[in-house]
Amino acid sequence: MSPASEMPVNSDPELEPDGVEAVVSKAFSRYRRRRPRNWQSAEEAMDEILCELRGELDEAIQYHYDFAAQVPSLITRDVGSLIELAEAARVHQLLIHVVNASPGHKPPPDVQYVLTGLLIRAIATLSEIEVLLKNGFSYGARARWRTLYEIFVVSRVLALGNRSTATRYREHRWVMLARERKRTGETDWASGSPTPEAMEVRLLRRFGKSFGGEYGWAAVVSKRKLNRATPQWADLVTLADTDVLRTRVQAAHHAVHGADALGLLGTVRSSLFHAGASPDGVLVTARDTINLFAQCTGSLLSLWRAYSPNKVSESAELLSRAILTDAQLALGYRVLAADPAERRAWQDAWASLLPSTT
């Protein structure tokens, strides 16, 4: 979709048929015809009209609600099942349970806590993306890539450090909580336990002043690798070396930001602004999501195995890789079969790798 070729010429509040449009039109018509009484404000006049139409509106909204419940089956009809995402989420959830519950050597407690938490958050994000996609909201699903990407960056930086880096990452929540309380003016805290502000003082004394920065947990790594004592997010990205994901991340940025006018194009369907469900982009977004999830979980499980080198962690990493490779291939082939533009791009990429015949 290009800004020049896909300019919306109208808005389309409901592509599916229902009675909401009729009720809204009736409210407009009544308001134009009605002269508010002297004591009645414009808002009160509209409230009165809404009361008159409440029964019709409730009935129309119920019809719309029932129709929306059919959207997943319509998306499946148009683009096929997204079972690969559900399979990846469920298998990885069970996989984490197994590696945590298995007897024998495990990573240090803080490493185990951090890696388990990051893996679970990645799985939860994948599940959220699946819900959005099977309900036809590919642009919203794309916005959730940012979370997966940030988890991936964090995992790469953790891998450059040691168990102390994981401890710093875990304890840095106190710094961030103290900062949020300061921003919001929050003062309440459960009695009998140190406040976030008191914990922050203790942690700065333990880890140094640089720990108080927004990404202070990575200060030791960034100082050693980049000579940056107070790292910013861009420094973490540099450390993680994630250039291969740059285009996906930029797409996620535009899908997130409301102040970004380029993001408006994500709500355009067939040259119209459309807020409802659509099969557009669902399959491509599913494929790219699995690719990004594979990068994220691969990094985290590799780090787990580095701290806990045994058959269980090895099995977890290999099973994850096999499941996600199958999903990547399945979704990739489906995109190529359904999207001529993707197919041409794939063919051009292969052609560029072949030796020249001239």
Image (tube, grey):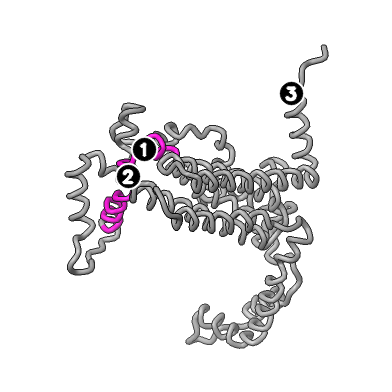
At mark 2, the secondary structure is: loop
Give the spatial CA distance, label 3 vs label 2: 43 Å
Residue 213 in view here: yes
Q: Position of residue 179 (x, y in %)?
A: 28, 53
Q: Quadrant of the C terminus?
A: top right
Q: Are marks 2 and 1 in contact (CB under 8 Å)?
A: yes
Q: Is residue 63 above or below residue 9?
A: below
Q: Is residue 154 left or right of residue 351?
A: left
Residue for point 57% across, 33% down? 244
Q: Earlier in the sequence, mark 3 or mark 1?
A: 1
Q: Nearer the viewer, mark 3 or mark 2?
A: 3
Query: Which mark identifies residue 214?
Result: 2
The residue type indicated by label 3 comes to Ser
Bounds of the magenta segment: 156-181
Q: Is residue 130 above or below residue 153?
A: below
Quadrant location of the N terminus in the rendered image:
top right
Task: Tell me which numbered mark, 3 or 2, is placed earlier along the sequence.
Answer: 2
Sooner in the amino-acid sequence: mark 2 or mark 1: 2
Front residue of this view, candidates 207 and 25: 207
- Is residue 253 visible in the rendered image? The answer is no
* Label 3 CA crowd tier, 10 Å (few <14, some 14–19, many 20+): few
Residue 165 falls within the magenta-colored stretch: yes
**Residue 70: numbered disc:** none
Q: Nearer the viewer, residue 157 or 91?
A: 91
Residue that carries the numbered disc 3 in the rendered image: 352
- Specify the quadrant of the image occupied by residue 211: top left
Q: Is residue 84 magenta?
A: no
Q: CA distance from mark 2 to mark 1?
A: 7 Å
Three-letter amino acid code at the position of disc 1: Gln
Please give the name of the residue rendered at 42% of the width and 42% of the height, measured from the top-left corner: 154
